[in-house]
Every structure is written in C-alpha cells, then in structure tokens.
Amino acid sequence: MPVITEIEDLKRMFRRRTPKMFYDYCESGSWTEQTFRENSTDFDLIRLRQRVAVDMDDRSTASTMIGQDVTMPVALAPVGSTGMMHADGEILAAKAAEKFGVPFTLSTMSICSVEDVARHTTKPFWFQLYVMRDEEFVASMIQRAKDAGCSAMVLTLDLQILGQRHKDLKNGLTVPLRPSPRTALDLATKWGWGLGMMQTHRRQFGNIVGHAKGVSDLSSLSSWANEQFDPRLDWEKVKKIKEMWGGPLILKGILDAEDARRSLDVGADAIVVSNHGGRQLDGALSSIRVLPEIVEAVGDQVEIHLDSGIRSGQDVLKALAMGAKGTYIGRAFVYGLGAMGEKGVTRALEVIHKELDISMALCGVKRVEDLSRDILLIDQDFHRFRRNM
Ligand SMILES: Cc1cc2nc3c(=O)[nH]c(=O)nc-3n(C[C@H](O)[C@H](O)[C@H](O)COP(=O)(O)O)c2cc1C
C-alpha cells in the first residue's frame, strides 16, 4: 500500500483503479477547460504570511456551517454518479463525512437514493436539488429529502443547461452507457471496480428510477435525463422552492455580485461561490477570484461558502481568510473514494485537515474565526479582470 500524504496520491490511485470513462467524467471541465484549470492555479496567486513566536498550543479547526458544528469548515460537495466511481459510493462517502464531523451533500443525480443513504447513516446530511421540468418530481423529491431528515437543501442554479465535456462524448458516457470497444475493454480490466459493481444492486440513479413519472428503466431514464433540466428556472421558482422546503437553503453556483444580492431577496441562508468545478461556463472566472467581490457585496448579510479547485488545506485556508465561512471539496473526495472507498474519503479529509491545521498555525492563527485577509499576500494579477463598464 503506497504512503498517502497528499490529495495527488489519491488521484493517482483513483486513476489506476477506475475505468477511464469515469475517471475522465470526474477529471474534466467543459470545452477548453480554462476555468477548470484556473480554479486550481488561481490559488497560487495568493501566498501566506508566515508568523512566528505565537503560542500554538490548544488550537482548533472547528467551526460552523449554517449553524451546524463542523470539525473543519469543509463539506463534501454534491457529485452526481458518485456510486459509479466506487460501488455504493454515496453511502461510503456519507459515512466517512459523518465520522469525521463534516457535512455530506447528496446529489439529485446520485446512484444511492436519499432513503438508502439515510438508512445507512445516523446523522442528518444535506440534499442537493436540481430543478427539473417535472414539477411533481421536484415536489416529491423535496418531500423525500424532508422525510429522510436532511438538514439543509443545496439548490444548484448553474445547470439549467448542460455544459459540454468533450471526453464524455468521446467515451460514450451517456445514459444508458454506449462504450466504444476500447472503453468496454478498459471497463473489463478494472476488476476491483467491476467486482464491487457486480456485488451491489445500486447501479442506476436511485432518486429517479421508479420515482419520476415514466422512468422505470435505463432507456426511459435516458430520454427523461436529456430533457429534464429546467431552462425556465428563475428567481420566482427559487422563492417557491424555498417555501416548499421550509428549512435552511443554500444557493449554489453564484459567481456574480448581482446574483449574490438577488440571493438575499429570496432568503438564502448561505450561498456557494462556485462555477461547478469548471464544468459549466468555460471562460468564467475561478471561484477564488470572484470571492472578494462577493464578500464585499453581501458578506455581512449572508453566509458565504466556496468550492471549485480546492485540492489542499492551504486552499481551504486561503478561501476562509478571504471571507468564506465554509468550503466544499468535490473531486478531492472522489479521488479518495475511487482509490479506497470509505477509507479513501476519510484519508482525503485527514490530509486536508492536517494541511489546514498546520498551515493556519504557521500563519499564527489558532481559531478559524480569527482568520482574516491579514494572513494573505495577494499577487497584483489576482485582481486583473474587471467588468467592462
Ligand atoms: C464528477 C462531478 C459530478 C458533479 N455533480 C454535481 C451534481 O450532481 N450536482 C451539483 O450541484 N454539482 C455537481 N458537481 C459540482 C460539485 O458539486 C462542485 O461544485 C465541484 O466539484 C467543485 O469543484 P472541485 O471538484 O474542483 O472541488 C459535480 C462535480 C463533479 C466533479
């Protein structure tokens, strides 16, 4: 077993063990992948101020996200088809998050259903909703999330229309799968993955098949999935969903100060500064570059979270110091899951926790709530892009 000291180690293992079509599905962005790349590289434009001779005994990374206690402010982001990266993936990731003391967010497009994840966990998790054209399905999904005891709803706003990832089309990653002979051969040679998939009954979208009208099998799911993301989603609908849900609402996919202000009008409890991990609008700014503008616009009125590009505890530290109250990791936990199942997700969280703890201490800060821009050194290039007024 290789020694795992960083997220990159888990990524290498994930790549070896997972069929190429699922690795590519995870590890790509839309179109030219500029935004996907810059989500990570823009963190390099921020450096940390080293401080010395500060008593670092008795320090802690504990904090809260929407009022819930967390071991560190790093939640697991909603990732569709997690259960294809590793058999029973959502259940395993939810268990790892629960034991670690961080929130797990279940995607609408998960393989394990919301009821199934609830049965295998003991604490409430968060549910991510995609707004579909089928209003009955949306209403029943909200009710099912309530019945399963979910403690927050993450409503994703940046996927009314699907961005295109070239590799998915080339690999035949469609519903149902249409693998090329080469891809099929690759699937057959990832025997550990294959064995897991053979041993589980969870192989299709658990929240949808048997629940959405007319979707009983893979081929009916195909036509449903292709036409269901609702392009008519607007702020009025967001308001309605907030009323239907009635609990804490987190709006995900905010990348503009004007949209952040609109989020206040609909009563969001938190917003996630996110570009969907570079999978939607290629050419959009990285989340970390947009964060200061959004903090300035609404930071004193709503809790701000950030995702996209986080691969280390240092990245988390930079986002928190810049004004985010919480962060999410998407790919970083999926690497761990694909590499080693539940243990791998735990390992990913441990790596990030250790990096956050030590880096925060070396910056001379003992508590998350004491973090501020004071610990950051920012490259002039970071503020290079401005709106053309
Ligand atoms: C494979 C994959 C599937 C995703 N599926 C969803 C999803 O179903 N719902 C959603 O709101 N976001 C989804 N996202 C976006 C993540 O929630 C998150 O915004 C993104 O992964 C953050 O970037 P990072 O992967 O660089 O951490 C997905 C991301 C990936 C990589």
Image (spheres, grey):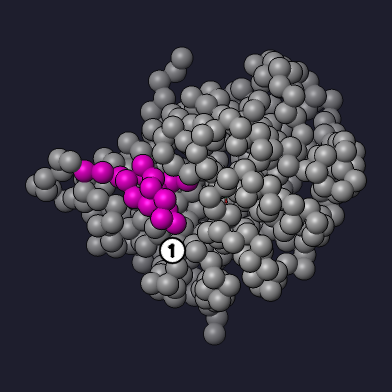
Is residue 298 left or right of 86 when viewed as pictured?
left
Residue 326: image x %, image y %?
42, 54
Is residue 163 left or right of 11 when viewed as pictured?
right
Residue at point 24%, 57% (across, down) = 370
Q: Quadrant of residue 227?
A: bottom right
Disc 1: which residue: 303
Residue 258: image x %, image y %?
55, 76
Q: Amino acid at mark 1?
A: Glu
Q: Is residue 230 visible?
A: yes
Q: Does residue 70 belong to the magenta stretch?
A: yes
Residue 340: image x %, image y %?
53, 23
Q: Does residue 286 belong to the magenta stretch?
A: no
Asked whether mark 1 and ligand 1 are closer than 8 Å, the reply comes as: no
Query: In the displayed image of the protein, which residue is found farthest to the bottom?
Result: 389
Q: Which residues are magenta?
A: 59-75
> For the residue labelled by badge 1, is the local secondary structure a helix, a strand or a loop?
strand
Count of residue discs: 1
Residue at point 61%, 22% (across, down) = 17
Q: Quadrant of residue 136?
A: bottom right
In the rendered image, the quadrant that contains the C terminus is bottom right
Residue at point 36%, 61% (across, down) = 322
Given residues 344 and 109, the one toward you in this image is 109
Given residues 150 and 128, the one toward you in this image is 150
Eyeballing the image, is 108 above or below 42?
above
**Disc 1 packing (10 Å; few <14; some 14–19; many ≥20):** many
Q: Quadrant of residue 99?
A: top left
Q: Is residue 46 visible?
A: no
Residue 130: image x %, image y %?
69, 55
Residue at point 87%, 48% (across, down) = 213
